Structures are given as structure tokens and as C-alpha cells.
Amino acid sequence: MHTLKTTFVAIMLSSAAYGQSLLPIAQNMSSQCNDDAAMYKFQQRSNVIESANLDGWQSLPLEGPALLDFDDEFLARLSWWTATVLREPQLSEFFARRIFDQLMEFDGVDGASQVLDNGTHRNQHSRFLNIAAYAVLAIRETSALGSEQVEQLIGFLEARITNPNFSNDEDYEASRCFASIANTANVDRCDNDTLSRQHLRMLYGELIGDWREIERGRIAFQFAIHDMRSDGALHRDASKGAYSWEEYAQSLNHLLAIGDYFARRGEPLWDYQNHRGQTVHDIVQFYVSSILDPSNPNLMLNYARNNLGVFQGRHYYNAPTSLELYAKVISRSKYADWLAIYSSWFPNAGFITDVRNVYRDAFLSRVPYNTGVNPWCVMPVSW
């Protein structure tokens, strides 16, 4: 295991490592972060899951609005508590205990875990586990709770990550994806969902001290670099019709979070190249160019019109080049978590100002969509 520090090392203007801290511990000056975090501290939200109504989980349906309400409210609460553990040392122990008590209570409710453990909802479950994993890392890294409680939390994660309903080899084995690089028609695997699973397993590996699990993140990152097209596109995500804008952003969120983790370990992947000399910067640049010029037929729309990996009957199935979801993406900061990470490591990138102006009116997401911890509130950038 690495020796972890609870101090934030000043960000370099190059791709040098941050130091040995594996989580971004920095006071973000965004007033919206402070306001939203305060709401959770003082329990001003009446519809967040509380001890009194956890019993309702026994009859919660396996899909529909009730599941999504939990998805938003429970995870928002968990992620804000994690941000507070990182941002405010004097409150770390108090909110670490809240995280511990909430997860242990959730674990004990008959039927509660079954909803997210159900194989039908692997994506929601992955997001939940990703947030929980960062919460445990934050607690361990700040020494907010004792080792026995940390081990209990790790056990909570292990029971779910290794659940057969959730653990799917097709999603987990990124090494298999290298064999599919030449297969450009099948985009249902080795895309953002695979990155999501590898990202989670990487965090899990860090918590249990298993380098083989940690390597899953590196392999997934490297696969994305080798699989990109000559123009920098992640074609498996870019080819998904109108949903390409969302899918590509999700992959970027995971890629940059994985890159951030390895850079903090002193093993930066930012300059890792494929045979054309391309790096993750080319993947970012393709998306930035597409965001800044969404109707350009030679960028995202060039792939989106293929409409691959989209099931017939989905809302935008017959409108693969629609820009309605583009408008949704630029209005929600959860699709721009990658930008917070990227601009922290590379603040002098020429496009930062332009692309942030596109997201200017986006509202700050209460739930980190793919990154596990809200980078807009724990990294030294402001919205």
C-alpha cells in the first residue's frame, strides 16, 4: 500500500505527479459548492433517504421513478458528505461517521441491496459503488475513522463488486477489448460501460491492495488510446446516434478520473501514445471541437449518423443527428466533470476558456455522474 498524505500538493503546469495523495484535497471556491454542501450538512432537504424511511426499500420497484429518486437523492447525499470529509478537516470525522452509518444501515435493510444488486440496473449500481469507493478512500486517506470501520466499509464494497449479477466479464475484462480494435461495427462493449467497470475495479484494487485490480484501470486507459480514430474520436461512443454526446462525455469522465489517479501515484498516463503518436489529449480535443462546433458534419455527427449500439424504439433512434441531447449535455455539469480534472492538470490548455463558456449556464450536478467524487467541489477550479 502507498503511504497516503492528507495535504494537497500544488498543481503543476505540466503532467508531473501531484504527489502521493490519491484524492484531490483542495478547497474549491465555488459558492454553489458551498451552498449545496451546506444544505446537506444542516438537513434542509426533506426528501433525502433517512433512517425512518429506509424500510420503504422492501417494496421499492426494480425500475421507474422511485429507483431514480433514490439514485439522485441517496447518491447526492453520499457524495456531498465525501466532499466535506475532503474539504473541511475539522468536520471529517463527523461526516465520515455519517457515511459509515448510512452505508451500514442501508446494508442491513432487507431488500434494499437487492434493488441495486439486480443485474438489470448494473449502470446505476456501478455509479453507486463508484461514489461509495471514493467515500471510503476519502475516509481512509484523511484517517477520519479507524481501520476496523474502514475494513467494514471495504467489505460492503467487496460484497457488491463481486456479486455475480453485477460482475460481468464482458464489462470487466478490458484486456479482451484489444482483440476487438479492428471490429468497428460492434460498439456495445469496450465503450463507456467498460471504462466504468474498470474504473471501479481500479478503486477497489487500491482499497484492498491488489495491483492486478489497479492494473484494470491502466489497461482500460491504454485501450482507449489505441482504439481512437485518426481524428481523435472514441468511435464506439461517438457512433451512438443522438446519444453520442452523452456517451462520449461519460467515457471522458472515466478516462480523466483514471488518468488523475495514476498521475497521483506518480505514474502519469497523460503522454501514453498509440502507434500514431496520439494521446488522451487528442480524445479530449475531438470532443472539445465537437462541443464548440456541434453541427460540423466532420466531427461528432460524422460518427453519430451511424446510429450503432442504439436499440430500436429508444427515443432518438430515428434522429441520430439530433442536437437535442447536445443541448442537454451542455446544460448539466455532470457531463463536464472531465473538464474540471483536465483544467486542473492542464490549466494553460488553449481551449479551456472557450469550452467553459459553452458550459457557462450549466447547473452544478449534485451527483458526480462518473467520476465518483464531484471534481468541481474538491479540485482547485471554479465553475
Image: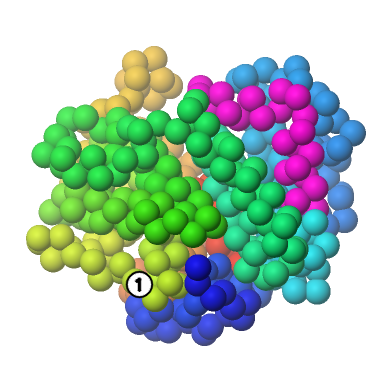
Image point 86% across, 50% down: which residue? Answer: 43
Give the camera-side residue of 28 and 112: 112
Question: In the visual, does 114 lie left or right of 221?
Answer: right
- The reply to whether residue 137 is in sight is yes
As drawn, 310 above or below 383: above
Quadrant showing the C terminus:
bottom right
Image point 75% across, 17% down: which residue? Answer: 59
Image point 62% across, 19% down: which residue? Answer: 62
Q: In the image, residue 110 lies at what x, y percent?
A: 75, 24
- The reply to whether residue 249 is in sight is no
Q: In the image, residue 367 lies at what x, y percent?
A: 62, 48
As drawn, 290 above or below 50: below
Question: In the visual, does 184 lie left or right of 352?
Answer: left
State the SS at label 1: loop
Question: In the visual, does 252 lie left or right of 47?
Answer: left
Q: In the image, residue 246 lies at what x, y percent?
A: 41, 41
Image point 11% across, 39% down: which residue? Answer: 182
As drawn, 34 above or below 319: below
Q: In the image, residue 281 lies at what x, y percent?
A: 28, 65
Give the camera-side residue of 329 and 41: 41
Q: Which kind of residue does numbered mark 1 sit on? A: Glu
Residue range in magenta is: 98-121
Give the camera-side residue of 87 and 38: 87
Residue 358 occupies quadrant: bottom left
In magenta stretch: residue 196: no
Find disc 1 in the rendering and name its residue: 267
- Give the dominant element type of the magenta stretch: helix, strand or loop: helix
